[in-house]
Image: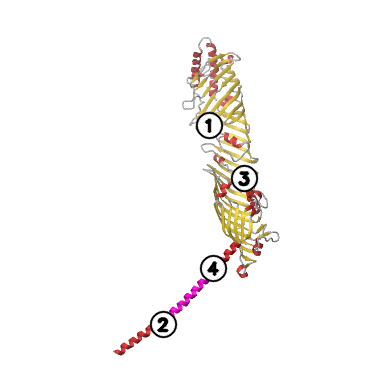
Amino acid sequence: MRWIIRVIGAIAILSIIVFIGFALLPAEKIAGFAARELSQRTGRDVRFTGRIRLVFYPVLGIRTDGVLIGNAPWSKSGPMLEAESLLIGVKLQPLFSGDVKIREFRAINPVVRLEKNRDGVGNWELTPANPEAARPEGAASGSRLKDLSLADGRISNGRIIYVDHQSGRDFRLEKADLAVVLSGLAGPATLSGQAEYGSEIVSLNARIAEFGMFLSGGLTGLDLIAETDFGSLGFKGRAGISPLMADGDLVVRTSDLAKAAGMAGISAGFAKTLDASGRFTLAENGNAYLRGMTLVVDGNALNGDLDLTVGKNPKLSAKLTAGALDLKTVLGTKTAGATGDAGATAETGWSKERIDLGGLHALDADVAFSADSVDLGGIRLDRTKLRAKLDKGRLVLGLQEVNAYGGNIGGEYVINARGGLSMGGDINLRAIRLQPLLIDMAGYDRLKAKADFSVKFLTSGNSMDEMMHRLSGSGRLDIGAGELLGLDLAGMLRNLDASYRGEGAKTIFSAISGSYMINDGVLINDDLKFASNLVDATGKGKVNIAARTVEYRLTPVTFSGRNLNEMGGVTVPLLIKGPWARLNYRPDLQGLLDAELAKKKQEAEENLKADLERLRQNAGEKVQQEIDKAVEDGRERLLDELRKRLQGQ
């Protein structure tokens, strides 16, 4: 930055003044004169807080025990530069021609405060209080410092603070031990050393092709490598610092993404490792672009282009393609396992491990994504095409083209990390092979068929266990012809024997259909229809998704196309009950007893109603006869009375 050249150059020139007047003037007057000269040259208040001493060996120069350089008038952060000790050793002869060749520079415990105000003005933009004083001693009016070189510059235990009041960014380097070599303003500059950023030690190595151009706003060659114990950042291309711009090849590698993201002030708990490379461009307005990118996250490779728009709400736009992706570790999920009895996985229940999706708040995004296959742990997808939109922690996944388990999946899936974690969706599955799907989701391999499935759901929680207990929604299931392995439902229903095992111990069916509701993790169905060539049945009951248990009743309505009433048979329901890992199938004798009692009760009620009706009818006939007789008797008495009266007249 230009202020560095002015400050160091001015101090170096003042070395001559100090040298000439050293024997004639007291140290206090020398310090006061030097401070006034520096203030004139920089336009900032400059104070020496300790003694100024002339140094003859090993170089000619000055040493001050303390120095302060004031900040911009609008800053409230303290001095722009302060150091406990400053040593500058120069070559004497080049100073007379306007060249400053610094042989040695030492800054002990310096603090550098760099700021950009809300209008984009940097505190390093210096305006000399007296333009004439800003010229080197002996230089003609209008001339400038010709050159500046530094053979050996060192900063010990330095502190560098950068605050951007426009974007709110705050960058701090602590305990900086740096070595600087500058071969003239038109020549290269090198920087090496290490500093502490946050709680991490960062080693730096940089080479700038033309230092003067780098500071003045032009682009010049830059090779940069920054390394920590968990990763590295490398850049090779062109860059400038005022304003900050870059264009070149970028390589980033980290074995701990959470730490790396933390250094950048964001959260990234959704992955562990990341490698990225591509052509990187940083525009003057702060927007960044990565073209021809290769991104590897936890071993998963993606290719494409990224655009990052900075501001109050940074936004990422991207087009990404991939081959086979395995996202189990990224999402923190595990495959249930393809065991016939679901093994220990179904026994242990849903994971209670906290789901950390804090990375969804890092920025907004609009990403188009396609992959040959995606393994989500609970679900495996084939050819997949998605559109993801992330807005303030709310992610909406549009399932544009998802092929899976021989069929396809469509709809929308939402993850909302605003004020807690919730998920919801409206998903439709068509012609899905159930056996591999249920193996992946729950370790259950007994159902072989294709199905159409629809679900609308909503849940919330910080773990899979919490989410399954708060799950609500509705949907419908239509399963085509298939097999239920491991038991013979038709044989059980026909023989009234839950231990019955027919040939192959399986149930062959032609269709299963029904609708359901979900509340607090419990799925309830009361309209199931089960059809096969041997038996038709209805079903109702519940599947406790949260507890991974089933309590369901199948009731036969026909055998081999004949109605049970026509056969004079007895309807014996089959009760399916137990945990997913050990479902128990048995005749529901209590249900049978209840059904028989209900039947007897209904028959008794119907008989009673019939008897009452007969009594009512019989009673009605007798009453009518009495009424008719009474009416007839009354009519005869009335006629007799009339006759008597007529005869008496």
The image quadrant of residue 480 is bottom right
| Circle 4 crowding by C-alpha within 10 Å: few under 14, some 14–19, many from 20 | few
Residue farthest left in this picture: 649
Marks 2 and 3 close (CB-CB < 8 Å): no
Q: Closer to the observer: label 4 or label 1? A: 4
Marks 4 and 2 close (CB-CB < 8 Å): no
Q: CA distance from mark 3 to mark 1?
A: 36 Å
Q: Which residue is mark 3?
A: 333
Q: Which residue is mark 2?
A: 629
**Is residue 194 found inside the magenta-colored segment of the image?**
no
Q: Closer to the observer: label 2 or label 3? A: 2
Q: Which residue is mark 1?
A: 170
| Circle 1 crowding by C-alpha within 10 Å: few under 14, some 14–19, many from 20 | few
Please name the amino acid that badge 3 sits on.
Answer: Thr
Stretch in magenta: 599-625
Q: Which residue is mark 4?
A: 602
Percent x, y for residue 594? Answer: 57, 63
Which of the two labelled residues, at mark 4 and mark 1, occupies the earlier sequence position? 1
Marks 3 and 4 close (CB-CB < 8 Å): no
**Is residue 601 found inside the magenta-colored segment of the image?**
yes
Q: Closer to the observer: label 3 or label 1? A: 3
Q: CA distance from mark 4 to mark 1?
A: 81 Å
The image quadrant of residue 258 is top right
Percent x, y for residue 575? Answer: 61, 59
Under circle 3, the secondary element is loop
Q: CA distance from mark 2 to mark 1?
A: 113 Å
